[in-house]
Image (cartoon, helix red, strand yellow):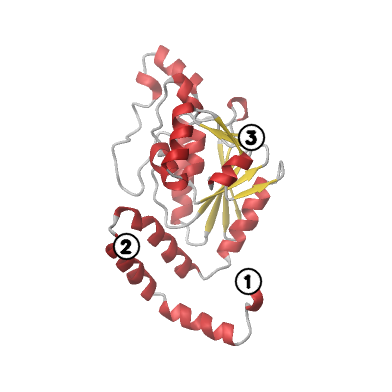
Amino acid sequence: MTVRTESFDDIRVVTLDRPDVRNAVDSATARDLHAAFLAFEDDAAAKVAVFHGAHGHFCAGWDLQFGARAARAGEGGALADLDFDRADARAIGPMGPSRLRLSKPVIAAVSGAAVAGGMELALWCDMRVMEADAYFGVYCRRWGVPLIDGGTVRLPRLIGMGHAMDLILTGRKLEADEALRMGLANRVVPHGQAREAAIALARQLAAFPQATMLADRESAYAQWDMPLPDALQQEWQRGKARIPDALEGAQRFAAGQGRHGRF
């Protein structure tokens, strides 16, 4: 099995496990990743997912050796049997889940290499917990392989056009400390601790009132395509449905819970 899933109460951990190729993804693995995250989406008991790469690397991108073998066999690049023209919220991408629009958060636990399509998978996640010696990079630049799993879309939105163009055009290595300064990494932790730190962060998110947190998350994603007045209106429409939750939370606060920054 190249994709493994584990459940820890309401946390789902999805692990990519192809150690011989630094967790690079072939078409079968792409399908398995896509299926694993759809299963997370459809499981009401799972609140937050952690996306992890086993054996010290997050993901080295698309498996170029697999692609080359398929091309030599006349299989048209090994992608012909995957349908990438769908645009719905459950569509598959070349790397698997990169076109899914989930209703619940996913946290990337990044160790070692997260490059090319692997970097795009990390960008797909809501947050990135990165080990101090891990690194990003558009390494596919040197082989003429395009970014087709959201890299040219999500990277500028996350870190701005200037930083994104630097990384997209040069394909250079981006280490954890610079990724943190850019806002691409949300947390940097010592070597070997990304998975556990991401699970701890997932537990924190899972402990919050879910309907309100998810409404705010969806509003933040939806606003990209809207003029400011429309964005503010959709924020209100999502938020007003959560007013009863807010009143209940205010009562808990008044009763003494959560004072002085405690959660």
Q: Residue at x 49, y 67 (%)?
A: 210
Amino acid type of disc 2?
Ala
> How many other residues sit within 10 Å of disc 3, few (<14), some (14-19) or many (≥20)?
many
Label 2: element kind: helix
Label 3: element kind: loop
Question: Does 262 appear above or below 193?
Answer: below
Q: Residue under label 2, please give it.
A: 231
Q: Residue at x 37, y 18 (%)?
A: 75
Quadrant housing residue 261: bottom right
Amino acid type of disc 3?
Gly
User: Closer to the N terminus: mark 3 or mark 2?
Assistant: 3
Q: Residue at x 32, y 71 (%)?
A: 237
User: Closer to the N terminus: mark 2 or mark 1?
Assistant: 2
Q: Residue under label 1, please give it.
A: 263
Q: Which mark is residue 112?
A: 3
**Could you give the CA–CA distance between mark 3 and mark 1, rounded to whole angstroms?**
32 Å
Amino acid type of disc 1?
Phe
